[in-house]
Image (cartoon, grey):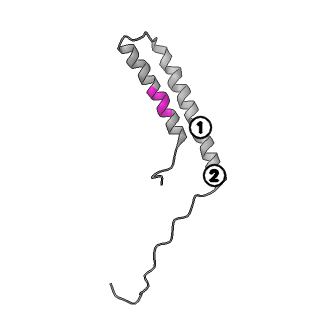
Amino acid sequence: MLRHEFQPGRLVAGAFLTLAGIVYVGDAGDAWETPWFVVIPLVVGGLFLAGTVGLLSRGIRRRRGPGPTPAAPPTDPRPDVPR
């Protein structure tokens, strides 16, 4: 059972921000040379894609309708017994 609702927009945003961090770490560790302006389109493009995915998933959820209703709380078989 899921503890929370899956949100693919946040997954996409996290993946692109992690990728931007890896690019900076590789540049800082002298693994490769990265110009400073490369990360800006990466982050902006990732956030745009994450927003698009989030809106798409929201539209799909709204169209599908509400999820399963929670079960009713159990009723006490002896309502006259003082507590």
In the drawing, does residue 41 fall left or right of residue 31? Answer: right
Magenta span dominant secondary structure: helix
State the image quarter where residue 82 is shown. bottom left
In the drawing, does residue 9 fall left or right of residue 82? Answer: right
SS assignment at label 2: helix
Point out residue 8 in the picture as x, y percentages from the top left corner.
54, 40
**Residue that appears at 50% across and 16% down:** 38
What amino acid is at disc 2?
Arg
SS assignment at label 1: helix
Spatial CA span between label 2 and label 1 = 14 Å
Q: Is residue 83 above or below residue 22?
A: below
Picture quarter with the C terminus: bottom left
Task: Residue 53: give its label.
Answer: 1
Q: Residue furthest left?
A: 83
Q: Which of the pair 83/32 is nearer the observer?
A: 32
In the drawing, does residue 18 fall left or right of residue 53? Answer: left
Q: Is residue 13 above or below residue 35?
A: below
Point out residue 32 in the picture as x, y percentages from the top left corner.
42, 10
Which residue in the structure is indicated by mark 2? 62
**Residue that appears at 64% across and 47% down:** 60
Point out residue 69 in the picture as x, y percentages from the top left corner.
55, 64
Q: Earlier in the sequence, mark 2 or mark 1?
A: 1
First to last magenta residue range: 13-18
Label 2 Cα crowd, 10 Å radius (few <14 / some 14-19 / many 20+): few
What amino acid is at disc 1?
Val
Q: Which of the pair 45/73 is nearer the observer?
A: 73
Q: Is residue 16 magenta?
A: yes
In the drawing, does residue 22 fall left or right of residue 69? Answer: left
Q: Is residue 81 magenta?
A: no
